[in-house]
Amino acid sequence: MRAVPFALLRHVPTRWNAAGRLQGLTDTGLSPEGEAAARQWRLPPPAAHWKRLSSPLQRARRTAELVQPSAPVAIDSRLREMSFGVWEGFTVEQLRATGGEVFAAAEAAGLDFHPPGGESPRLAMARLSHWSSTLTEPVVAVSHKAAIRALLAWATGWNMLGRPPHKLDWTCLHFFVAHGDGRVTIERLNVSLTS
């Protein structure tokens, strides 16, 4: 049965990340601090020689371009961030303060958290599990926090209620394996990108 390794990397910070704002599909660029961090990142073996893919959003594309060793970057729209719909641009604290019971109920829905006009983690999980099922060679994919959490949920059976089964360091690379039957399993998490 086919098993294809792949690695996921979250883009480096933007100004919106620093402010705690939900970005979703809002196409924000990297902050100067983010650019500087990405220039210091180096993919470890064997990922250093794998094909490089990226979400189409500029914060992921630019991270994929800056991480070393340098490599061509192919765009795959399935790696995009989960859409937060009308909640994009707000912080969770703002939404809790103004959204009342509606936002509280949405937060309590786990995989079915569904922002108005947005996408649920369950839908993002389906999109990313389909993406992983089409892999034919090892890749490093630069994506986004909510998208990577959705794939973690797929790999572990986590319902996105309570703490995740594994704490992900967003400054590290995460290795998974895509299996021919559609499953995704964890290989290694939190692999350092600095020497």
Image: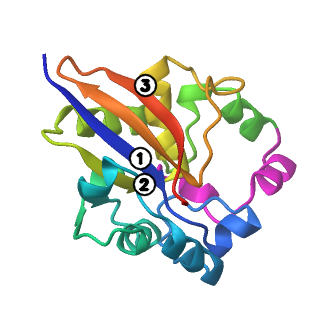
192 relative to 100 in the view: left or right: left
Residue that carries the numbered disc 2 in the rendered image:
143
Q: Which residues are magenta?
A: 81-100
Question: Residue 40: horizontal and vertical position, in percent?
Answer: 53, 71
Disc 3 marks which amino acid?
Trp
Pointer 2 and pointer 1: residues touching (CB < 8 Å)? yes
Mark 1 secondary-structure assignment: strand
Residue that carries the numbered disc 1 in the rendered image:
8
Task: Please tell me which of labels 2 and 1 falls first in the chain.
Answer: 1
Disc 1 marks which amino acid?
Leu
In this view of the protein, which residue sits in the foreground, 146 or 7?
7
Q: Say if 69 sits above or below 81 in the image.
A: below
Q: Say if 91 sits above or below 36 in the image.
A: above
Task: Please tell me which of labels 3 and 1 falls first in the chain.
Answer: 1
Q: Badge 2 local density, few (<14 within 10 Å), some, or many (20+)?
A: many
Q: Residue at x 31, y 72 (%)?
A: 70
Residue that carries the numbered disc 3 in the rendered image:
154
Disc 2 marks which amino acid?
Ser
Mark 2 or mark 1: which is in front? 1
